[in-house]
Image: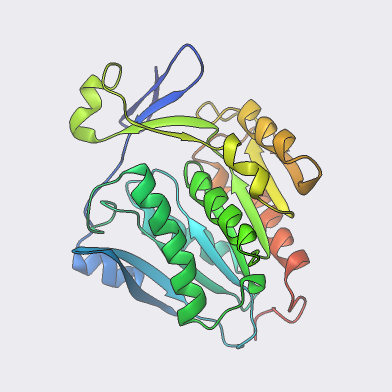
Amino acid sequence: MLTIGAVRVLRSHDGRLHIPYLTGTLSADAYAALAVQGWAPTSLAVAPGITLNGLVRRPSAPDAPWVLFYSGNDQTPLATARTFLERLREGHDWGLATYAYRGYDSSGGSPSREPMTEDAKRILGSLLEQEHLSPSRLHLVAFSFGGYFAVRVAGAAALAHESVASVSLLAGALDVELVPRSREWAASVIPGDVYQTLPWLDAVPAPVLVLQGDADTTTLPEHGRAIAARLGSRAQYVELPGVGHPELLGSEAAVAAVRRQIESTSLSSPEGTAR
């Protein structure tokens, strides 16, 4: 058994992680506190009675690149995403967006794999429509189990001939099972939602950055290596020495690698620098 913070993480004999969905509430005041310094609150209705909370930071230039972030299984996903994206955009005029999944940060509904996958696709479509973007100006960045959604979204977009500019997978979860917190005690006997990334990678076009810390005991280094191997020549694999799972988003080397990926694949590069 692993422990991340106060969360029990079980690993089965076949290597699959078993983790509770870390859903939680976000007060109106806390949400408003995130929507400052260029950030604005945004929302997306994904089903009757279910609306997702999000954050968006619009660029100055109408042709600037955009970054859409799919968070990991995080008790404070909007705050975590905002902090990472602020570091990522340093010195650049990039649009930034992120949404909390169902049940996270006071978004409506309860987490479930297929509805959340459809939500992830709706998020992409809504962002393209509302911000008048072509897919070629949008970069997907994802952490941990958020990589599953980024892969599903990127593959679906490519099959529709609307490929995004790039995909960056940080500590991608190869095989993980998530259960509601109310069923955490029975995780070993009651099946949860299984997220397996490998079967969906074949539809994902280049370029893909696969970034992994070699001290990650949650999504193990061999997970990142397996994802990169499946992608083959479509992927660039970077393994950072001494970096664990929660530390990856705060690693300057990781931020720099993702920044280079976006810079090198942006249609407006190098004009996408801050003004």
Q: From the viewer's perspective, is 8 left or right of 59? A: left
**Quadrant of image for the N terminus:** top left
Q: Is residue 250 above or below residue 107?
A: above
Q: x, y percentage for residue 79?
A: 38, 59
Image color mode: rainbow
Using the rendered image of the protein, determine whether residue 240 is visible from the camera's viewpoint.
no
Left/right placement of residue 41 relative to residue 150 reads left
Q: Residue at x 20, y 68 (%)?
A: 28
Residue 160 vs 131, above or below: the answer is above
Image quadrant where one finds the C terminus: bottom right
Q: Residue furthest front?
A: 160
Measured from the top left, where is residue 189 in percent x and y?
A: 27, 16
Residue 225 lies in what quarter of the image? top right
Residue at 53%, 41% (x, y): give it.
Answer: 247
Is 264 located above or below residue 212 in the figure?
Answer: below
Farthest top residue in view:
13
Q: Is residue 27 left or right of residue 238?
A: left
Q: Position of residue 84 (x, y in %)?
A: 51, 58
Q: Residue 41, how many percent across, how many down?
A: 34, 74
Marks counted in the figure total: 0
Asked if one can make out residue 206 in the rendered structure from this viewpoint, the answer is yes
Where residue 210 sits, quadrant-wise, is top right
Q: Residue at x 59, y 61 (%)?
A: 157
Q: Residue at x 60, y 53 (%)?
A: 155
